[in-house]
Amino acid sequence: MSEQDIQHIRNEYSKESLSEKDTDKDPIKQFDKWFTEVLKSEQSEPTAMTLATATTDGRPSARIVLMKGFNGDGFSFYTNYLSRKGKEIAKNPLGALIFFWDTLERQVRVEGTIEKLSREESEKYFHSRPKGSQVGAVVSPQSQEIPDRDGLEKKWQEAEAQYADKEVPKPSHWGGYILRPRLIEFWQGRPSRLHDRILYKKVDNKSWKKVRLAP
């Protein structure tokens, strides 16, 4: 496909609108409303979110992870602490999230600070996962170079047999994080690219200020 062909790929958004008066004063409650609606839609992987992190010298990286919870404190996910994102978070805790729900022509952007969840929370979630996923977390040296897939699968099979009749211990290098937001933006696609953008900014670490942004 030529660059010219790619430049002509576009969709016209027209499903909904978003106004200041129709949004909750609390962005988490507004997120809950939108999340409830996307769960009723045909969206594939509604919990999928892009997580962006960066090194201390500003080199960014991004990947898709799955949100595993949200509340007034923030948005949580789980991963290997020794992965690239884990190492970046350890040195630079500033991060960002993006949810894109094309079925509703909506996007949510979140910026804030990332912290580890408690060991207890991580243990609880780890043991709620399918056993195969628990074994995968034990044997996979996430983000590290490996010689081939066969060796990884062999380790998984050996660990699966080892823990066939007993609990899989949560690895010390695996657990949860929470991104505590200081900024949350709700984007609703509109015709002629005049999209609706409602931004919430944290004020004094307590209340939220709501403003409209130009598209």
Image (cartoon, rainbow, N blue to C red):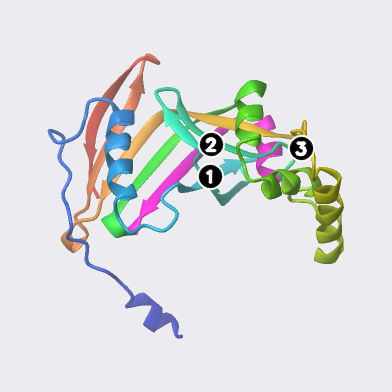
Q: Which residue is mark 1?
A: 51
Q: Residues within 10 Å of mark 1 (few under 14, many from 20)?
A: many
Residue at the spot 81% in from the left edge and 53% down from the top edge = 156
Q: Which residue is mark 2?
A: 95
Q: Is residue 89 magenta?
A: yes
Q: Position of residue 83 (x, y in %)?
A: 72, 43
* Depth check, front residue: 168 or 47: 168
Chain-order first, disc 1 or disc 2: 1
* Depth check, front residue: 142 or 185: 142
Among all residues in the image, which is located at the extreme bottom? Answer: 1
Q: CA distance from mark 3 to mark 2?
A: 31 Å
Q: Position of residue 171 (x, y in %)?
A: 77, 34
Q: Please, what is the three-letter code of the amino acid marked with disc 1?
A: Leu
Q: Residues within 10 Å of mark 2 (few under 14, many from 20)?
A: many
Q: Residues within 10 Å of mark 3 (few under 14, many from 20)?
A: some
Chain-order first, disc 1 or disc 3: 1
Q: Taking 93 as reference, is 104 left or right?
A: left
Residue at the spot 65% in from the left edge and 35% down from the top edge = 126
- Which mark identifies residue 14? none
* Depth check, front residue: 203 or 126: 126
Chain-order first, disc 3 or disc 2: 2
Above or below for 212 versus 103: above
Q: Is residue 181 magenta?
A: no
Q: Please, what is the three-letter code of the amino acid marked with disc 2?
A: Gly
Q: Secondary structure at mark 2?
A: strand
Q: Secondary structure at mark 1?
A: strand
**Residue 146 shows in this picture:** no
Contact? badges 1 and 2 (CB < 8 Å) = yes
Q: CA distance from mark 1 to mark 3?
A: 28 Å
- Which mark identifies residue 168? 3
Image quadrant where residue 206 sits: top left
What are the residue bounds of the magenta stretch?
84-102
